[in-house]
Image (tube, rainbow, N blue to C red):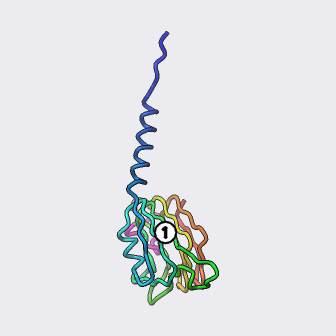
Amino acid sequence: MIARLNLRPVCAALGIAIFAISSAANATVHRVYPGQSLQAAVDAASPGDTILVEPGTYKGTDSTYGLRITTNNLRLIGKTSKGRGDKGKVRILHDGSQETGVYAAPAGCEYRDVEGSCDAPRVKGFYIRGFTVEGFPQNGIQTRWVDGFQFVDNESVNNLNNGIYPTLSA
């Protein structure tokens, strides 16, 4: 009797691995320095990109959020310098009318929308490390309708409702 080898699962796994490697190979690292727009870097990023942020103070220009993320698989990494106090941190400060410091959600889905009201595809993957978010009247860092997120070594300072607030996310 001759045994037949089913190559379909092997070929499927190989195809997925090649896609993952090519996606990682196309990822870009965007660097942001004090005085530059962090939101502009986020807006220019593609899925899988990393935004590396130098220590400094950043203020949002949006009327609702200090920083708005809608891109899949985006990595925000704040470079911190220990022993330098606030000068060694990546700080996002409330500036005017913003309600939430960092908000990750699908485009068109806002933090005041009720459950079930966002019919956009969920954001897939969000990573934020090394940020200090300060003085917002609602939330410091919030995800909404995001699958696969990580918050690592972030600080929430004097945000009135919630410091770090994943909601309707998995």
Q: Residue furthest bottom?
A: 96
Quarter in which the C terminus is drawn: bottom right
Q: Position of residue 30 (x, y in %)?
A: 41, 69
Nearest the camera: 4 or 22?
Answer: 22
Q: Which residues are magenta?
A: 107-117
Q: Position of residue 74 (x, y in %)?
A: 45, 64
Q: Position of residue 34 (x, y in %)?
A: 45, 82
* Residue 118 showing in the rendered view: no
Q: Quadrant of residue 85?
A: bottom right
Q: Position of residue 167 (x, y in %)?
A: 54, 67
* Residue 51 showing in the rendered view: yes
Count of marks placed on residues: 1
- Going by the numbered disc 1, the residue's amino acid type is Leu
Q: Is residue 131 left or right of residue 67?
A: right
- Write down the residue under mark 1: 76
Nearest the camera: 69 or 74?
Answer: 74
Q: Is residue 110 magenta?
A: yes
Q: Residue at x 46, y 38 (%)?
A: 13
Give the structural element (helix, strand or loop) at label 1.
Answer: strand
Q: Quadrant of residue 51?
A: bottom left
Q: Quadrant of residue 86?
A: bottom right
Q: Is residue 80 above or below residue 117?
A: below
Q: Is residue 165 left or right of residue 12?
A: right
Q: Residue furthest right?
A: 83
